[in-house]
Amino acid sequence: MPDRRLLFNSIGTCRLAIGLTAGNPFSVKITATKPLAALLATCLLAFTPLKASLAETTLTITGVEGNLKENIELVVGKPPPVEDSRKYRRYIAALPEQSTAALSALGYYAADVEVADRTDQAAGNTVITVKVVPNDPVRINSVAIQIQGEAKDDPSYTRILDDLPIRKGAIFVSGQYESSKSTLLDHAQDLGYFQFEFTETTVRVSRRKLTADIVLTADSGPRYTFGDIIFEQSIFSRTFLERWLPFETGDPYESSLIGELTQNLQNSGYFQSVRVAPHQDRRYGTQVPIKVSLKTRDENEVAVGIGYSTDTLARVKLNWDKPLINRRGHSISTQFGVSRDLQKASIGYRIPRRNEPLYNYWGIEYGLLNDTTNDIESFLSTLNFQRVSRTSRQWIESLFLRWERETFTTGENGVEQRTDLVMPGVSYSRTRSKGSPFPTWGQSANFQLMGGSKDVLSTIDFLKATGQFRYLRAISDRNTLIGTVQYGVIQSNNYPRVPSTQRFFAGGDRSVRGFRYKDISPKNEDGEAIGGRFLEVASIEYNYRFRDLWSAAVFTDAGRAFNTYSDGYSVGAGIGLRWQSPVGAFRIDFAAPVHDPEDTGGFRIHLSLGPEF
């Protein structure tokens, strides 16, 4: 590059010559004839780069891959620019030792390391090459782990020894050795061996034989036990509170039981805050007293909700709960809901049975429902007695006896009818999910079977079975698939007397989108929906998360509520948008019929709010 000259004169004579040639830094020469000119020239130099650019310096590691290569890169760090000669020389000088240390940490004590650097003047690049020959690693020749004290014969403690990563024949990794020591100590603390200590920790590494011999000896001391259990509250009787205890005074201490007690009390639904604190102190010897501090929920809880969906339009809901009526934990809840086509009210009373009243209780509920959806007019009274339990596999089981009296007009004959049903039944439901706020996996299932007989207080013989399964799976960080299947069947000796609330309908936000709420159904001669004996619905949806709380969706739904299997399926499809609000996903779907046996046509917008599960 040719030289360039800059002549600067101001209040005197100042000559500033800047020369730039390929491959060389700037050269600067200042000649000033007056003091002020020299000052201005100096200021100009303060804003003039002294070098055209910094050469790029890269590090290349050969001979190893995976963890070995990553550990070297982590230890040696990023190379400094070659222009910073002091730092660069120190970095090059330390590379062999640091690389060897990084390899030794993973068991390769006999590795050979060579370092070379090369500068390409034309390209302005410097490449540092670390050539590694890992050779054979150090392997564990013998492991002697001995636990003395009470833990020596404790199966729950000795079982952990089989899961330690340090074992004969394995590559000796110092990090695994240290983590094994931490595991033994942490497990001792969890099981109440608070005096646990190592009496010998020895590792002998032979670089010649490439072997490691490990000796670990520890004294566990005595195992502590649970002491007195003190409840700080003034509402419940001690007998009632003890049903939540997973341990008793004198039982061997175990920290997981502290967590279980905390969770039991939190899940009870009675307490606003729960604090379970073990007190380990010399004053108590080998006992650990447990202090349980409880703050009960408010005596009355009122919630008002206002919502909107395309199925029910605007709706208002009012809940009033009294979570605690007496010292035995009885509770009461009431609910009122009003929308254009549905008005309902209910009151429920719960009596806890075991240590999780949310899932194990006796329940009595009475409710009223007025339904004028589409072509249906119905008024329903319900009285329900149930026994609710949670099984060992987390299913919620409900054994119930339900009485229903419904006065309805379905449009079949325009005549108002009344049907009484007394139905014993059973239902099972379970919901599981992972991930928040966007689930990465989830499934929900519920099944119900109930029926009545005209010989036992019912107007007709009636049997109904329903089932629903919903599955969600994230196939990557931003891509999710959701599938749903529903099925239902009714058997009766007098189907026209089957109440409208027990019949099957499809269509709407949570059914077949693209169709009006409860519009997919057998019709009478006037084209009015009257409900069907059978229900089949399937849905598949793909979600793509394009921003933190926003997703786009593509879906297809198909279903039918029918009396004969020759009836066709109604199919809807569309696109949607989801926003993850604090109370669940807000969904807006644009859907249209793809196949409509009734040829109703049209395009619908569906709005809904709530969690996926």
Image (cartoon, rainbow, N blue to C red):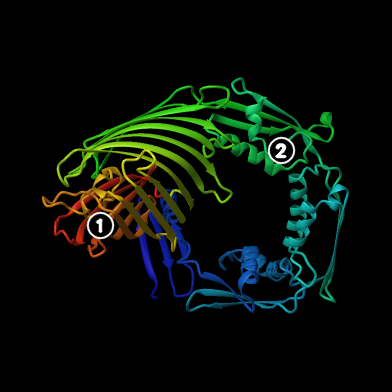
From the image, tell me which residue sits under label 2.
247
> Where does residue 84 sit, x and y in percent of width and height?
58, 64
Q: Residue furthest front?
A: 455
| Placement of the N terminus among the 4 image quadrants | bottom left
Hey, what amino acid is under mark 2? Phe
> Where does residue 539 sit, x and y in percent of width and height?
32, 59
Hey, what amino acid is under mark 1? Phe
Front position in the image: 9 or 510 = 510
> Looking at the image, can residue 174 be seen?
yes
> Looking at the image, can residue 545 be seen?
no
> Where does residue 41 sit, x and y in percent of width and height?
42, 54
Could you tell which of marks 1 and 2 lies nearer the N-terminus? 2
What is the quadrant of residue 240 in the picture? top right
Seen in the image, is 461 located left or right of residue 321? Answer: left
User: Label for residue 562?
Assistant: 1
Residue 237 against residue 483 in the figure, above or below: above
> Where does residue 3 sit, x and y in percent of width and height?
39, 72
Q: How many marks?
A: 2
Are discs 1 and 2 less than 8 Å apart at CB?
A: no
Tell me the distance, in whole angstroms, between the alpha carbons under discs 1 and 2.
55 Å
Front position in the image: 552 or 251 = 251
Q: Residue furthest left?
A: 526
Residue density around tag 1, few if under 14, some if 14–19, many if 20 or more, within 10 Å: many
Residue 58 against residue 396 in the figure, above or below: below
